[in-house]
Image (tube, helix red, strand yellow):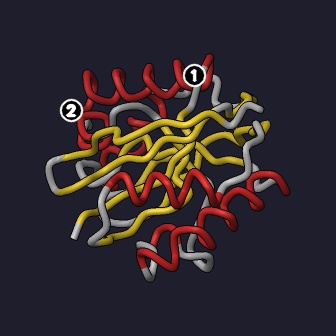
Amino acid sequence: MKKYALVIPLTGPIDDACQEAWALLAAEYGVKYISSRCPFPYLPLYAGSTKRSAETVFSVWREGVSSRTIDLRSDGLGVFLFNSPILYVRWLRTEALSTIYAEAMKSYGPICGSPAISTQPEYWTPKTTLAGTDTSVDNLSGMLDCIEGIDFLQSFRATELAILEFDENGESVVSRFSLEK
C-alpha cells in the first residue's frame, strides 16, 4: 500500500517564516524531524493509503477538487502537548478552506477508504507542522522563545495543490496542480 497526502503548499512570506523556524529549531535544538522529511511547508488536506497508482490518485484528486484559488490566513502558533509536543502554525477554518477539505475527503475516500487520523473530520486541524517527534516538554519553552520574533500572522493565496507520497523515510512530491482558472 502506498501512502499519499493532498496538501496546500505555502508560498511567499509565510513559507519563508516556516522555513526560518525550521532552520532555527534545527540549529538551536537539533529539532529537524519534520523539516528533514518535508519537501516544503504545507497545510495537509488529506492523507491515507491505497493500492492505486500515483497517476490514479492524481486524476481522482484533480477531478474532485474545484479549480479556484483560496485565500488563507494564519492565526499564530499552536501546540499539541504530548511527551513530544507538536508545534504548528494555525490556520483559520474559512468557508473556502472547509469546502476544499470536504472536496478532498469526498474525492479520495472512495479509492482510499479511511483517511489517516490527523485528517479525519473529527480530528482535522488546519495546521502547518513546524516540529514534532524529536521535541520534548523540557525544551518547549526554549523552542517557542527561539522563534518568537517570526511573524506567523499572515495571509497568502493558495494557487496550487500538491500530492505527496510518504513513508517512514520521508515525503516526496508526486505532482502539483494549479487552482487558478
Q: Look at the numbered disc 2 and give the secondary structure of its residue.
A: loop
Q: Residues within 10 Å of mark 2 (few under 14, many from 20)?
A: few
Q: Residue drawn at (56%, 31%), measured in percent from left and top?
A: 10
Residue type at mark 1 is Ile
User: Looking at the image, is 156 positioned above or below residue 47?
Assistant: above
Q: Residue drawn at (48%, 61%), measured in percent from left and top?
A: 80
Q: Nearer the viewer, residue 136 or 167?
A: 167
User: Looking at the image, is 23 positioned above or below residue 142?
Assistant: above
User: Looking at the image, is 107 positioned above or below residue 165?
Assistant: below
Identify the disc placed on residue 179.
Answer: none
| Image position, residue 151 (x, y; %) | 64, 23
Residue assigned mark 2: 30
Res 53 → quadrant = bottom left
Residue type at mark 2 is Gly
| Image position, residue 35 (x, y; %) | 31, 35
Q: Residue drawn at (38%, 66%), measured in percent from left and top?
A: 82
Q: Would residue 150 appear left or right of 97 to someone viewing this image? A: left
| Image position, residue 17 (x, y; %) | 54, 22
Marks 1 and 2 sit apart, C-alpha to C-alpha, by: 19 Å
Q: Nearer the viewer, residue 161 or 124?
A: 161
Q: Residue furthest right?
A: 95
Q: Which badge, 1 or 2, comes first in the chain's sequence?
A: 2
Q: Nearer the viewer, residue 53 or 119?
A: 53
Q: Which quarter shows the C terminus?
A: top right
Q: Look at the numbered disc 1 and give the secondary structure of its residue.
A: loop
Q: Residue drawn at (52%, 18%), measured in percent from left and top?
A: 16
Tell me whether circle 1 and circle 2 mark residues in contact (CB < 8 Å): no
Residue assigned mark 1: 150
